Image: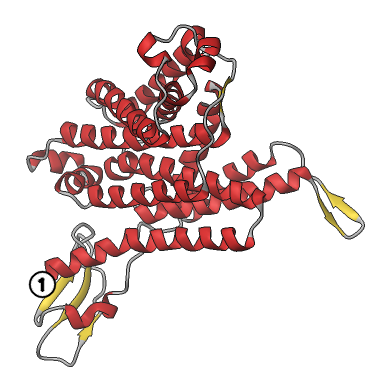
C-alpha cells in the first residue's frame, strides 16, 4: 500500500470510529436506558447533525457564523409544509399555495427537500454575504438570522407566526436520528478531505497566502456554506418532527448559543471535536436539567434554580477558551493508530498528515519495523 492510500485509510477511520461511538451509545441506551434517556439521546443525535453541519462551514473556513439557526427554521417549516395533513394545514396555515397545501410527502423525501431548500437559500445568501471577511461576515450572518426570524414569526397565514404549528408526524426514532448523524459525519469528512475542503482549510490558516497561491476563497467558502446549509436544514426538520410542534422561538438565540458552545468546547478545527462537544455539552445540560427538577439525596432534596443549565454551558465555554483554546480534541482527529496498519504500508514510505505537516508514520527497509516521528512545525523545529 502506498503512503497516499495509507493516509486515505487513516482519514476514513475517523468517521467510522465516530459512527461506532454513536452506535455504542445508542445500543447502551436501547438496552439499558428508559424512555427519558432515549428521548435525550435522540435530541443529542439531532444536535450532532446540527453541529457537524455547522462545522462544515466554520471548521473549514474559520469564519464564525451566527446565522445557521436560520437554516434550521427554514428546514423545519419546509418539512412541516410537506408532511402535515392537508386538513390541518387548511386550518392552521391558510395562506399556503394550493400545491403545497395539498402535499403530503413521506418523511424522508420531505427531509431531503427541506435540506435542498436550505441549500438554495444558503447559495443565494452566501453569494452576497461571503464576499465579506472577518467580523463583518459574522455580523452579516447574524443579520440574516434576524431577518429570517422576523419573517417566520410574522407571516401568520404561512408559518403561523408566533403561534405553534402542530400536527407534524413524529417519526424520528433513535435509529432514524442515528442514521442521519452518521451520514452527516461521513459527508463532512469526505468534504473536509476533498480538494475544495483542503483548499478552504488553507484559507483558514492563512487567507492572504492561500489567495496568492491561486485559491478562490470566495468559491470554496460558498461551496462549504451551501453544504452546511443543507445539513443544518435537515437537522431543523428532524428537530421539528421529534417534538411534533413548531415555533420560530425554538430556532433563535438559544439554539444559536448552544450549537456554538458545543463547537467551541469540542474544538472548531476538527470533526472529532464537533462530535465530542455535542456529547459533553448534552450530558452537562441533561445533568443540570435533572438538578433543576430536583433530586433526592437521603432525607434532603437538592433543587437548583431555573437557568442553571444555561449558566453552566457559559462557564464551560469560558473554561474551554481559557484552558483548552483548541477544544477537547485539541484539533486532533480520532483515528486508528498508524502502527496498527504498519503491515500494509510499503517499504521506504513516509506518511504525513496532509494539512498539519505532521509525519504520522515512517517505514524503511533498513530497520526492523517502523517508528513514530515527532510533529514537524512550520518553522521546521
Apparent side of residue 80 relative to residue 135 in the rendered image (left or right): right
Query: Which residue corresponds to the image point at 52% horizontal and 39% vertical from the top-left?
Result: 258
Question: Are there few (<14), some (14-19), or many (20+) residues within 10 Å of tag 1?
Answer: some
Q: In the shown orientation, is residue 290 left or right of residue 157?
A: right
Residue at x-position 22% and y-position 25%: 131
Q: Nearer the viewer, residue 343 or 39?
A: 39
The picture quadrant where one finds residue 6 is bottom left
Quick check: 201 left or right of 295?
A: left
Quadrant showing the C terminus: bottom left
In the rendered view, does 370 fall on the left or right side of 178? left
Residue 148 pos. (x, y %): 42, 18
Camera-side residue: 285 or 213? 285
- Taking 93 as reference, is 129 above or below it? below
User: Residue lying farthest bottom?
Assistant: 368
Height in image: 13 above or below 319?
Answer: below
**Residue 137 location (% of width, % of height):** 31, 27
118, 178: nearer the viewer: 178
Residue 337 seen in the figure: yes
Q: Quadrant of residue 206?
A: top left
Image quarter hosting the N terminus = bottom left
Please give the count of numbered marks on the rendered protein.
Answer: 1
Q: Which residue is mark 1?
A: 2
What's the colour scheme?
Answer: secondary structure
> Residue at horizontal 25%, vertical 43%?
204
Secondary element under disc 1, as helix, strand or loop, is: loop
Q: In this rendering, is residue 290 above or below 379?
A: above
Estimate the x, y position of residue 370 in percent, counting from the top left: 20, 84
Q: Is residue 267 visible?
A: no
At horizontal 26% and vertical 61% (from top left) the residue drawn is 12
Residue 268 percent coordinates (x, y): 38, 48
Amino acid at each position: 500500500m502506498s503512503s497516499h492510500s495509507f493516509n486515505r485509510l487513516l482519514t476514513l477511520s475517523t468517521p467510522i470510529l465516530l459512527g461506532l461511538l454513536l452506535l455504542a451509545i445508542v445500543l447502551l441506551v436501547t438496552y439499558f436506558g428508559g424512555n427519558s434517556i432515549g428521548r435525550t439521546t435522540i435530541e443529542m443525535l439531532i444536535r450532532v447533525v446540527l453541529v457537524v453541519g455547522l462545522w462544515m462551514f466554520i471548521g473549514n473556513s474559520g469564519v464564525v457564523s451566527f446565522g445557521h439557526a436560520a437554516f434550521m427554521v427554514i428546514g423545519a417549516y419546509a418539512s412541516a409544509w410537506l408532511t402535515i395533513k392537508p386538513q390541518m394545514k387548511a386550518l392552521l396555515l391558510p395562506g399556503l399555495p394550493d400545491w403545497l397545501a395539498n402535499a403530503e410527502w413521506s418523511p424522508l423525501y420531505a427531509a431531503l427537500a427541506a435540506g435542498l431548500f436550505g441549500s438554495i437559500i444558503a447559495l443565494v445568501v452566501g453569494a452576497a454575504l461571503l464576499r465579506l471577511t472577518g467580523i463583518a461576515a459574522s455580523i452579516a450572518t447574524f443579520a440574516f438570522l434576524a431577518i429570517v426570524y422576523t419573517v417566520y414569526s410574522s407571516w401568520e397565514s404561512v408559518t403561523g407566526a408566533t403561534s405553534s404549528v402542530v400536527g407534524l408526524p413524529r417519526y424520528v426514532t433513535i435509529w432514524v436520528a442515528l442514521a442521519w448523524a452518521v451520514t452527516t459525519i461521513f459527508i463532512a469528512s469526505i468534504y473536509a478531505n476533498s480538494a475544495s475542503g483542503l483548499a478552504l482549510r488553507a484559507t483558514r490558516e492563512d487567507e492572504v497566502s492561500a489567495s496568492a497561491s491561486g485559491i478562490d476563497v470566495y468559491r470554496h467558502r460558498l461551496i462549504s456554506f451551501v453544504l452546511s446549509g443543507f445539513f443544518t436544514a435537515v437537522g431543523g426538520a428532524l428537530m421539528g418532527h421529534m417534538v411534533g410542534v413548531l415555533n420560530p422561538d425554538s430556532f433563535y438565540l438559544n439554539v444559536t448559543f448552544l450549537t456554538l458552545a458545543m463547537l467551541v468546547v469540542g474544538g472548531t478545527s476538527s470533526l472529532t471535536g464537533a462530535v465530542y462537544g455535542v456529547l459533553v455539552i448534552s450530558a452537562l445540560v441533561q445533568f443540570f436539567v435533572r438538578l433543576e427538577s430536583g433530586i433526592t439525596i437521603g432525607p434532603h432534596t437538592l433543587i437548583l434554580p431555573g437557568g442553571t443549565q444555561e449558566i453552566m454551558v457559559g462557564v464551560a465555554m469560558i473554561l474551554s477558551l481559557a484552558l483548552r483554546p483548541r477544544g477537547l480534541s485539541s484539533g486532533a482527529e480520532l483515528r486508528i493508530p498508524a502502527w496498527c496498519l504498519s503491515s500494509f504500508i510499503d517499504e521506504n514510505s513516509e506518511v504525513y498528515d496532509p494539512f498539519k505537516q505532521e509525519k504520522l508514520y515512517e517505514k524503511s527497509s533498513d530497520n526492523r519495523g517502523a517508528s513514530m516521528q515527532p510533529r514537524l512545525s512550520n518553522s521546521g523545529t
